[in-house]
C-alpha cells in the first residue's frame, strides 16, 4: 500500500458514514450529469460485534437528455460489499415492478409461473391472482376495460352481478340450513309466514329458479280459488308456473312412496295447469299477464329436502318425475346445488374432480 492509498477513503467507509435517509447529490465533472444516492439501514446481523448492514441506492442522471441512465444498489455488511447494477433499465419501470411485487401474493406465486392458459381458466383462484397481477399495472387495467367494453367477453357490471349472485347463494345456504339465520332473515323482511320468506327470496333472486324462466309476471291469481306462487314467462315466451312448499314438507313414506302431502301438492299443481289453460281466451287475465301466450303450461314444484337421501330415495325421485309430463318436482337442496354450479361454487364439481361418484342434479 502506498502512502496515498493510506489516506484514500474506501467506498465501504463512505457508505457506512453517510446518514440514513439523507439524499446525497454529486455532480459529474463538466456538469454532464449527477449522482443521486440515499442510504438506509438494513437488518441487524448478530456477529461477534453487532454490525448494521447498510443499503446504498445510487442513481446516475444525465442532464443532456434528462434521463436516468443507470441504477446501482450496494449493500455493505461488515467488510463485505455486494452490488447490483442496472445500467440500461428504465428506472420508472423498476419502480413499477417494485410496486407490483409489494401488492402481489408472493406466497401464492413463489413456486408457479403465471401463464394465461387453461390451467388458469379452470381455476377461479388462479384467475383472481392473474387479474390482480394485470390490475397492478395501469396499462393492464386499461386492457381489462378495453376487453370488457369492446370484445364482448364480459359486459360492464358482470363482475358485480356475479358477486351479487354468490352472495345470494350464500344466503340461500344459510337460511336453508341454519334456523337462526332463517329467523333473522325473516325479521329483516318483516313477514309473518315462513312461506313468505321463500316467496320474497326467490322474487329477489329469480335466476335461482332456473334458466328456463326469463321474467316473473306481476299476476299470481289464476282465479278466485287458485293463487300460484309465481306465474312466469318462460325462455320460449310462454306462461309457466312455479309453486313453493316449505323445505320441511315430508317427502317419502317408509316404503319410499310419496307422502300424502306431496301427492296433494302435485294435484294442486295439476289443477293450476288446468285453470291456467282455461284462461286462454280471458281478455282481462291476458292483460294482467302482459299478453304472454298460454300454451301447454308447465309447472315446477319446489318441495322438501334431499340432502340426506340415499340411492333408494334418489331412484324413487327419478321415477316420480318421469311419471309427469308437465310437472317437475325439485327439492330445495337440488335447487341450491344448481345455483352453486351457476356461480362456480359447487361442491359437486369439486367432488367430481377428485374422482368421487355423485348423483346428477335434475335441470
Image (spheres, helix red, strand yellow):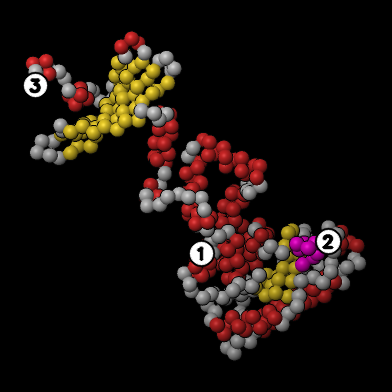
- Badge 3 element: loop
Q: In the image shown, does 187 or 167 lie closer to the viewer?
A: 167
Residue extending furthest toward the front: 2
Which residue position holds label 1?
A: 180
Which residue position holds label 3?
A: 1
- Depth check, mark 1 against mark 3: the one in front is 3
- Badge 2 element: loop
Which residue position holds label 2?
A: 292
Q: Quick one: quadrant of the C terminus?
A: bottom right
Per the model, the C-alpha gap separating discs 1 and 3 is 85 Å
Local crowd size for mark 3, using a 10 Å CA cut-off: few (<14), some (14–19), many (≥20): few
Q: In the image shown, does 283 or 120 lie closer to the viewer?
A: 120
Q: Quick one: quadrant of the N terminus?
A: top left
Viewed as shown, does residue 73 lie left or right of 189?
Answer: left
Local crowd size for mark 2, using a 10 Å CA cut-off: few (<14), some (14–19), many (≥20): some
The residue shown at (36%, 25%) is 70
The residue shown at (63%, 64%) is 198
| Residue 65 image position (x, y, % from top left) | 44, 17
| Residue 282 image position (x, y, % from top left) | 90, 65
Mark positioned earlier in the residue sequence (1 or 3): 3
Residue extending furthest toward the top: 30
Per the model, the C-alpha gap separating discs 1 and 2 is 40 Å
Q: Which residues are magenta?
A: 233-240
| Residue 11 image position (x, y, % from top left) | 20, 24
The quarter holding residue 143 reads top right
Amino acid at each position: 500500500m502506498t502512502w496515498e492509498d493510506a489516506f484514500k477513503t474506501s467506498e465501504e467507509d463512505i457508505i457506512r458514514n453517510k446518514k440514513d435517509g439523507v439524499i446525497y447529490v454529486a455532480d459529474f465533472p463538466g456538469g454532464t450529469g449527477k449522482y443521486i444516492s440515499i442510504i438506509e439501514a438494513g437488518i441487524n446481523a448478530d456477529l461477534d460485534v453487532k454490525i448494521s448492514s447498510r443499503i446504498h441506492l445510487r442513481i446516475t442522471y444525465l442532464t443532456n437528455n434528462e434521463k436516468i441512465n443507470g441504477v446501482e444498489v450496494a449493500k455493505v455488511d461488515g467488510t463485505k460489499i455486494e452490488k447490483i447494477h442496472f445500467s440500461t433499465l428504465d428506472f420508472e419501470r423498476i419502480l413499477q415492478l417494485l410496486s407490483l411485487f409489494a401488492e402481489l401474493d408472493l406466497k401464492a406465486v413463489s413456486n408457479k409461473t403465471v401463464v394465461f392458459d387453461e390451467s388458469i381458466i379452470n381455476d377461479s383462484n388462479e384467475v383472481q391472482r392473474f387479474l390482480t397481477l394485470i390490475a397492478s399495472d395501469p396499462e393492464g387495467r386499461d386492457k381489462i376495460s378495453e376487453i370488457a367494453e369492446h370484445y364482448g367477453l364480459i359486459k360492464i357490471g358482470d363482475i358485480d352481478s356475479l358477486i351479487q349472485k354468490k352472495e345470494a347463494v350464500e344466503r340461500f345456504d344459510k337460511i336453508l340450513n341454519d334456523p337462526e339465520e332463517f329467523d333473522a332473515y325473516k325479521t329483516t323482511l318483516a313477514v309473518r309466514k315462513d312461506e313468505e320468506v321463500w316467496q320474497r327470496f326467490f322474487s329477489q333472486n329469480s335466476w335461482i329458479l332456473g334458466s328456463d324462466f326469463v321474467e316473473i309476471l306481476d299476476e299470481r291469481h289464476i282465479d278466485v280459488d287458485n293463487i300460484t306462487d309465481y306465474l312466469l314467462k318462460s325462455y320460449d315466451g310462454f306462461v309457466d308456473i312455479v309453486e313453493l312448499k316449505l323445505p320441511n314438507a315430508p317427502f317419502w313414506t317408509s316404503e319410499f312412496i310419496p307422502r300424502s302431502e306431496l301427492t296433494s301438492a302435485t294435484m294442486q299443481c295439476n289443477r293450476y295447469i288446468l285453470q291456467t289453460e282455461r284462461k286462454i281466451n280471458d281478455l282481462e287475465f291476458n292483460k294482467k299477464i302482459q299478453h304472454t301466450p298460454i300454451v301447454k303450461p308447465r309447472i315446477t314444484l319446489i318441495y322438501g329436502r334431499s340432502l340426506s337421501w340415499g340411492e333408494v330415495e334418489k331412484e324413487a325421485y327419478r321415477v316420480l318425475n318421469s311419471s309427469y309430463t308437465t310437472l317437475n318436482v325439485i327439492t330445495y337442496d337440488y335447487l341450491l346445488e344448481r345455483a352453486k354450479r351457476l356461480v362456480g361454487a359447487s361442491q359437486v364439481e369439486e367432488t367430481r374432480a377428485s374422482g368421487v361418484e355423485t348423483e346428477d342434479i335434475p335441470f
